[in-house]
Image: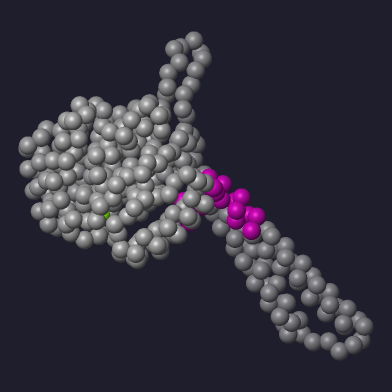
Amino acid sequence: MDISVIVPLYNEAESLPELQAWIERVMQANGFTYEVIYVNDGSTDNSWEVIEELCRRNPAVRGVCFRRNYGKSPALNTGFARAKGDVVITMDADLQDSPDEIPELYRMITEDGYDLVSGWKQKRYDPLSKTIPTKLFNATARKVSGIKNLHDFNCGLKAYRQKVVKRIEVYGDMHRYIPYLAKNAGFNKIGEKVVKHQARKYGTTKFGLDRFVNGYLDLATLWFTNKFGIKPMHLFGLLGSLMFMLGFIAVVIVGAAKIYAMHSGGHYTLVTNSPYFFIALTMMILGTQLFLTGFLGELIVRNSSRRNEYEIEMETGGGETPAATNEK
Ligand code: UDP
Ligand code: MG
């Protein structure tokens, strides 16, 4: 099968028939073999009935229905697990993304050799309250992830080589960082294509302004787990040791000053009158805690069943025919 289209949706009943008809038009015009997987993320409108109707009309349509609303990432992850196409395309259900982009995205994966191609809504039809923070957000994501050529991390329209979606795990709200997840899994050929964007035709947006706060927190988590996930002591141990040392040096200075003052017979005060005493104390306590946090992190990693899982691209030798081991 050439293409799997995955559509996560939450209360988008009005858009679905139009979207499905449009996808079918594009697929037929280009002669693709395909499937469309609608993941109904606990909609409270009649989206599921609409999906069932679409399935009856076209055997290429499949539906998955969550019992409650989990979020866009779990919906995508569920679709990824079921996708059978060589190229997997994700698309929002609200008709903001255009199915007309599918053939070119498919070509970029199959001919240009990209692992992932992300849409770039260069000209957006969203309110300013969304487009300005988005610019900032993308600049930070570029910097932290090191994927310098992406302008629009969170575009719903993306295309993937099948093995990419089988390798990455999207959870929480991590759909905003799928290119970063892919890069962390060793997929380096990440490209971009300018795509047409339209104003929302039906319904309302499902994300409020809290998307930006959560977005930044998730980015911090990803950065940390990628860099120190299997060696937490390298961060906490270093910070803890540094702080403890500084505190210790400060204590020695405070103590030495006191002893010197006592012996030189001059006027001396209690060490607790010196602000440095408290600074030293706090630093030593915090330093010890950071160090212990590092140790606890290491113990947790030691117990993780995934501590020794690596991305193996292929293996060869030993008299057997070389085979790509990770292909699914
Ligand atoms: N969506 C979802 N679960 C949610 C929220 C959103 O499946 O909890 C879907 C939604 O139905 C749409 C896509 O994710 O197909 C993008 O959402 P939306 O258009 O509201 O986001 P925006 O375009 O405003 O960024
Ligand atoms: Mg939208």
* Prevailing secondary structure of the magenta residues: helix
Answer above or below: position of 297 versus 130. Answer: above
x then y, percent, for residue 219: 45, 55
In-image side of 56 versus 96 (left or right): left
Q: Nearer the viewer, residue 38 or 26?
A: 26
Please indicate, yes or no, whether residue 39 appears anywhere in the rendered image: yes
Residue drawn at (83%, 79%) of the image: 258
Residue 32 placement, left or right of 181: left
Number of labels in the image equals 0
Is 5 contained in the magenta span?
no
Measuring from the top left, give residue 238's x and y in whole percent: 65, 55
Q: Residue 262: where, in percent of width, then height? A: 87, 83
* Furthest-right residue in this view: 264
Residue range corresponding to the magenta coloring: 219-239
Q: Position of residue 16 (x, y in %)?
A: 14, 47
Q: How is the image coloured?
A: one colour
- Identity of the residue drawn at 79% across and 70% down: 252
Q: Give the residue drawn at x 8%, y 48%.
A: 49
User: Quadrant of the rendered structure where residue 215 is?
Assistant: bottom left
Q: What residue is drawn where x is 15% and y is 33%?
A: 60
